[in-house]
Amino acid sequence: MSVHSDKKTTTLVTLLNKKKAGEKIACLTAYDACFATILSETGIDVLLVGDSLGMVLQGHDSTLPVTMKDMVYHMECVKRGNRGALLMADLPFMSYASESQTLENAAALMRAGANIVKLEGGAWIENTTKLLAERGIPVCAHMGLTPQSVNRIGGFHVQGRDTEQAQSIIDEAQLLQSAGASILLLECVPTKLAKAITDMLDIPVIGIGAGPDTSGQIMVLHDVLGVSPITPKFVKNFLTDSTAGIPGAIKAYVEAVENQTFPSDLHSFK
Ligand code: KIV
């Protein structure tokens, strides 16, 4: 295990200031203590304990089987390894279906070490966002492609390609900011739409498959290291060109996000 760095702790204020200053925010998923240390010491601002763990760790073909028990376990592991990154945790499928369930599950993730919880949805999570934010639990609203709804959507497809759908994503993003969301995460939407939403909102907008103009980028750790079984268009393997192993690959990712060489057109949707 490497030594502690003197990197300061990242907070939501840090991220807001970065957006205001036009500095890009670099985020990655993490699921264990060892990687949490490497990633946070290499300059990652936000570590997401994502329900993608159902696919990359557990081998499921969607995130739906992931439970609260899984999320709390991995959150606790990441918390132990973290060296100053902001910690975000997913509320898994059906864990925010009622008010009492939402509060109980979000509280469990915060007790396990999360600084903010992420939930997927549009207008229908407005009240949930308000409920959590009013009780001191920061919310990241995940919009665009929402993998927990894969059965309704009919696959992992780009969202917001037609004018009507794009406008409803814009309206719902505004609604969720007004409801108290602290971060918006946009997955698999066209570059132009992600830019419009990023420019419109005050809160940081983090993109994955959303082009280079969002306030920052997030990727699944296994994708960045080229060990995922599937590689969507927006994925880049940073390990291939690394001469310094995994820390070198993570450093290259952080630098590419910061100097805006990633994502390129090759990794974005028109
Ligand atoms: O669960 C996850 O890892 C995510 C990312 C794809 C953003 O939500």
Image: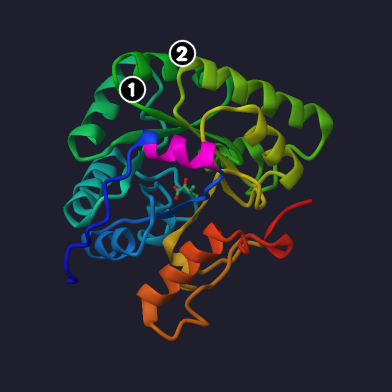
Q: Nearer the viewer, residue 154 or 99?
A: 99
Q: Which residue is denoted by mark 1 in the rendering? A: 102
Amino acid type at circle 1 is: Thr
The residue at label 1 has a CB less than 8 Å from ligand 1 = no
Work out how far the residue at label 1 is from the one at label 2, CA to CA, in angstroms.
Answer: 11 Å
Q: Which residue is denoted by mark 2 in the rendering? A: 127
Image quarter (top left, top right, bottom left or bottom right) of the N terminus: bottom left
Q: Tell me if mark 1 has few (under 14), some (14-19) or many (20+) residues whose alpha carbon lies within 10 angstroms of its own.
A: some
Residue 198 figure quarter: top right
Residue drawn at x 67%, y 40% is: 194
Q: Is residue 91 something one can see in this rendering?
A: no
Where residue 214 sits in the image (x, y, percent)? 61, 44
| Disc ID at residue 112 | none
Residue drawn at x 44%, y 43% is: 64
Q: Nearer the viewer, residue 249 or 119?
A: 249
Q: Is residue 17 left or right of residue 113?
A: right
Residue 234 vertical position relative to residue 93 in the rendered view, above or below: below
The magenta stretch is 14-21
What kind of element bears circle 1?
helix
Prevalent SS, magenta region: helix
| Residues under numbered marks 1 and 2 in contact, where contact means CB atoms less than 8 Å apart | no
